[in-house]
Amino acid sequence: MMINEQYKYSDLTSKIIGCAITVHKALGSGFQEVIYQRALEIEMSLAGISFHREYEMHIYYRE
């Protein structure tokens, strides 16, 4: 995968995209989102990428 070094997080972004591609190649399409989330969690852990999954955020809609 080509990495554009002019961006601050190019290496990390490349790794994340690589994980997503790996999951897609392995599973294909048609599963519920949670299946892809769990598979991506495994891939990112194997790649040594630290992350948090589905944390709560305050969203304001129409005040």
Image (spheres, rainbow, N blue to C red):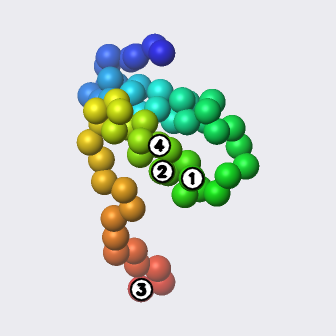
Q: Earlier in the sequence, mark 1 or mark 3?
A: 1
Label 3 sits on residue: 63
The residue indicated by pointer 2 is 38
Q: Secondary structure at mark 3?
A: loop
Name the residue tied to disc 4.
40
Residue in the foreground of this view, choosing between 55 and 32: 32
Hey, what amino acid is under mark 4?
Answer: Leu
Spatial distance from mark 2 to mark 3, Cα to Cα? 34 Å
**N-terminal label among 2 and 3:** 2
Q: Are circles 4 and 3 on residues that touch, CB within 8 Å?
A: no
Tags 2 and 3 touching, CB below 8 Å: no
Residue 7 location, quadrant: top left
The numbered mark, 1 or 4, whose residue comes first in the sequence reads 1
Label 4 sits on a secondary structure element that is helix
Q: Residue 50: percent from the left, percent from the top?
A: 26, 42
Question: Label 1, on which residue?
Answer: 35
The residue furthest right is 30
Q: Which residue type carries mark 3?
A: Glu
Packing grade of label 4 (10 A; few <14, some 14-19, many >=20) is some
The correct choice, above or below, for 10 with respect to 34 in the image is above
